[in-house]
Image (cartoon, rainbow, N blue to C red):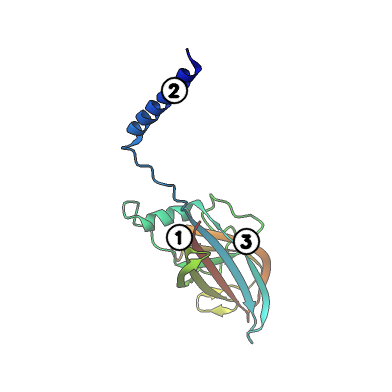
Amino acid sequence: MDPKHFGLLLVAIVAVSSGATYAILEGVSVQPTIKNGVQLLGHVEVVVSDAQGNIKAYRQSDNMIVTDGMELLAENLFSTVNASSAKISHMEIGTGGETAPAAGQTDIITVISSCAREVAAFSSVNGTMNGSPNANVTATATFEGGNVGPNDCDDSSIDEAAIFNHATGGEMFARNTFTAVELTADDTLALTWTFQFTDT
């Protein structure tokens, strides 16, 4: 075959093939992938103050949201999932910080028997960070070292904290450990838990 004619034949084949491909794909709509995913970060601050308000100890570290905590999120976000679970409401401190947080944990490791869970106060701020939407939720609770009401939380080695959806039982949402602090009879321990929801 004449090389010139062969070249024209190849062009014709490519043209026909391209047309067939276009005909096949013409009815298909392909949307660009949108990178989107919610990330939840938790951070804890522990402040021990004396009777005059002087800070005696300060700790900060990130927490672990446990498996029950992830289930709580699903249960409270979606009505078709077990909606009977209560919302997060209480904090607790303990002395079992030598055990690192783990996904399967369901309670504080070592409770202080005379120190009950405290009701948490919540506040939230919504906005954007680096162009992405985000929301910050802050929970705070205060524990007294002396015998104030039902609580007597003084201990020489407080090194763990957790947040729950019930005053006594319920489900643990997250747990945190930190270098031990001492809480004497005249001291207070302020526990601040900050959760940041951000679009990754």
Q: CA distance from mark 2 to mark 1?
A: 81 Å
Reading the chain from its start, which is encountered first: label 2 or label 1? 2
Q: Circles 1 and 3: CB distance less than 8 Å?
A: no
Viewer can see residue 112? no
Task: Report the disc number at residue 11.
Answer: none
Q: Residue at x 50, y 75 (%)?
A: 150
Q: Nearer the viewer, residue 144 or 113?
A: 144
Residue 18 quadrant: top left
Reading the chain from its start, which is encountered first: label 2 or label 3? 2
Q: Position of residue 74 (x, y in %)?
A: 40, 54
Q: Nearer the viewer, residue 65 or 170?
A: 65
State left or right for residue 15 relative to residue 97. Answer: left
Residue at disc 2, secondary structure = helix
Q: CA distance from mark 1 to mark 3?
A: 20 Å
Amino acid type shown at disc 3: Thr
Q: Position of residue 142 (x, y in %)?
A: 54, 75
Q: Position of residue 85 (x, y in %)?
A: 38, 58
- Name the residue tied to disc 1: 169
Amino acid type shown at disc 2: Leu
State left or right for residue 197 relative to residue 85. Answer: right
Q: Circles 2 and 3: CB distance less than 8 Å?
A: no
Q: Position of residue 152 (x, y in %)?
A: 57, 74
- Name the residue tied to disc 2: 8
Amino acid type shown at disc 1: Gly
- Name the residue tied to disc 3: 177
Q: CA distance from mark 2 to mark 3?
A: 76 Å
| Tag in front: 2 or 3 | 2
Reading the chain from its start, which is encountered first: label 1 or label 3? 1
